[in-house]
Image: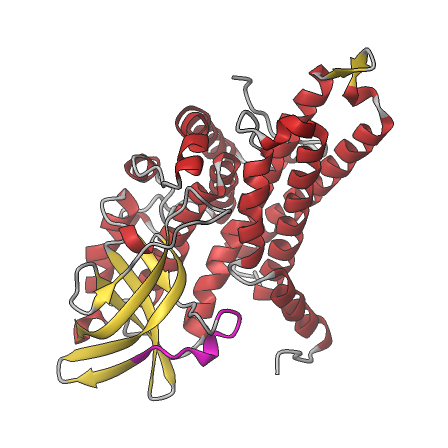
Amino acid sequence: MKKFESPDLYNIDSLLNDDEKMIRDTIRSWVDEAVIPIIEDHYHKGQFPANLISQMGELGVLGANLPQEYGCAGVNNVAYGLMMQELERGDSAVRSFASVQGALVMYPIHEYGSEEQKKFWLPKLASGESVGCFGLTEPDYGSNPAGMKTRAVKDGNFFILNGTKMWITNGSIADLTVVWARMNDEYYGFLVEKDTPGFRAPEMKNKHSLRASVTSELIFEDCRIPAKNLLPKTGSLKHPLRCLTQARYGICWGAMGAAMACYDEVLDYSKTRIQFEKPIASFQLVQQKLANMITEITKMQLICLQLGRLKDSGNMKPAQVSLAKRNNVHFALEIARNSRDILGANGITSEYQSMRHMCNLETVKTYEGTHDIHTLILGQEITGISAFF
């Protein structure tokens, strides 16, 4: 297999420190050796490669940017982003697993949990010993989480949960669910463990996209959980939304990894595919597509790097994440589509990865805030006027 090298027309590697490059290259090698050889088979079977979970734990990618004192790698946010880039270069399902585990389960426990909750759960989640999921989206409330119907009622030393969540990554394999529910017109996070009576998580099948990812429904029917399972620092909708900002940050980098995979594949293909007695890379229309691809990838790289530096300095704004998520996923999808086009009929076979990335990116464009929702977030940021209400 040809060794992958990042497209780097602007010498962006020179802007990374040695640790960041070492971390990226370590995950890159692992993706080449452990993910890419098996992922097509898992995609077609509609199965998540569960054997990768413990390996991701050993590599430190789960909650990588959280503190070492809880068993996490404690890397900076640029290094974390580079990890997500490489994981999604393998497949969106692998990056989605890591994003949910780290940004949507471990992050809220770290930010909003008790010290007891942090010490118990974070090391287990960081190692991959336990798997988590994040329950916010509901069948009738995706882009408008404020309307959620899931309710919590205090009953002595317990809370009783009732409601349904939808499109939940990792739900059916999770040992722990961070679920959000309304109580007294406020929004609280709760930790619900697997096999709790009144809780079930049936898997959603027959997907055309993210087929190697576990997607589930979460159903709570008089689900009774101990009061100690409340995340004590929650109580506002801003708390789950901050979790989404963390996940969206990883997606910005991940989508770029998928785009890089498609570009690398089709650049090599166009140099070796002979038509009219010469490689198709010699034709103007193919060169135009390749030029557009490297232009957009370079823009993604610069956006992500600056976003990571802002995050590390504590100056990142949610609207900046929206810009990056909106831009990078949109153009990654365009790159995947054009890659499939250059590959011709070959592009629909599993010998090539571009169509798998293309299908996956259709989901990535929708989840963690649709393209249009991020458009409105940006619109509010630049005008000061909300178009949501």
Q: Judge left or right: residue 226 versus residue 75.
A: left
Q: Is residue 149 magenta?
A: yes
Where residue 349 appears, as percent x and y from the top left, is 56, 29
Spot the residue most to the top.
Answer: 277
Q: To which quarter of the image does residue 168 belong?
A: bottom left
Query: Relative to the observer, which residue lies in front, 12 or 109?
Result: 109
Q: Main secondary structure of the magenta part?
A: loop
Residue 165 showing in the rendered view: yes
Q: Is residue 246 magenta?
A: no
Q: Is residue 344 above or below residue 216?
A: above
Residue 257 showing in the rendered view: no
Q: Is residue 127 above or below residue 35?
A: below
Q: To which quarter of the image does residue 261 belong?
A: top right
Q: Residue at x 15, y 67 (%)?
A: 197
Q: Is residue 372 above or below residue 56?
A: below
Where residue 148 appears, as percent x and y from the top left, is 42, 77
Where residue 13 appears, as percent x and y from the top left, is 61, 33
What are the residue bounds of the magenta stretch?
Answer: 142-151
